[in-house]
Image: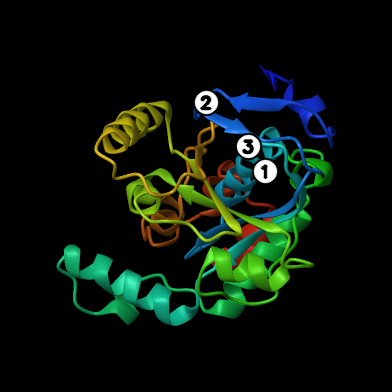
Amino acid sequence: KERVMRVPSDIRRTICMGDDVVDKDNNVQISMQQETKSAVVVLGSAANPPHMGHFHCLEVGKKKAEDLGYHVLFTTLAIAPYGYVRKKMERQQKKQQQEDVDSNCFLLPDSSRLHLIDLLASNINADDSSFSDSSLSFKAPPKCFGSALECGRALRTSDDVTVVVVVGGDRSKMKWRKAPKNDQITVCCARDKDQITELHDSFESDKKEGLVLDHSYYFAMGVGPPTSSTIIRSIIEDDDLEDKMPELLKHGYSKEAARFLCS
């Protein structure tokens, strides 16, 4: 008879054969009877603009994947193409009852967002960075993608590699009510502890009503940092703020990345 036991995550990541373990955060039993599976961790975002919070969410998603027994090959960002970002910004402008998107909206082209990611990634190993290459294993995206799943499938080494899609808390309910693909699991990185509690309650309620279709959906215990693309845009668009560099540096930008963003 098989036993169910708890195995520390650092040991669990290296075990290839053994008993089943339980992910107590999500009340899910995980089979360890086969060799550890490989995975890539992908966060999809408009990234207008990219910021260090995106990398934090990747780190949280990577840790959760490793706790679930996956060997993470790399993490990456799937940034949406310009057309999608433009439509998203137009919707936001309509909500604010503004008309002229081009003159009133901060909108970066694909090439600028990709370049900013490169600049941010180059700062990961800096002395003042909370990240390290070993903790993040970041791989810069070569282009824009329509979704995190599409990006993961395009960049993974084989079809046997699982795509771990990291999502924010605001869109979580849309995700767990949809059946996932066979090669995908989803990890939610909430913006704060209150949102985690709210999402857990909502998840359990949906579960009782049979609305949870994604049984490979997990909550990460780490929360996102107090920054966002909206906050960064507000700094850039603030005409009363003459020197924007100090504010951008507070949000984790390197000097080079901040200069590029200000230009």
Q: Give yes or no for contact between labels 1 and 3 (Cβ–Cβ under 8 Å).
A: yes
Estimate the spatial distance between the alpha carbons at disc 1 and disc 3, rounded to whole Å. Answer: 5 Å
Residue 168 spot, x, y in % from top left? 45, 47
Q: Which residue is mark 2?
A: 25
Image disc number at residue 229: none
Q: Is residue 134 above or below residue 148?
A: above
Q: Which amino acid does the dot numbered 2 rest on?
A: Asp
Q: Nearer the viewer, residue 62 or 20?
A: 20
Of label 3 and label 2, which has the lower sequence position?
Answer: 2
> 52 and 244: which one is in front?
52
Q: Amino acid at mark 3?
A: Lys
Would residue 263 be seen by someone viewing this image from the given angle? no
Give the image location of residue 37, x and y in percent: 76, 48
Is 108 situated above or below 68?
Answer: below
Q: Residues within 10 Å of mark 2 (few under 14, many from 20)?
A: few
Image-quadrant location for residue 178: bottom left
Q: Which residue, given by chain and number where applicable, does mark 1 sit on? A: 62
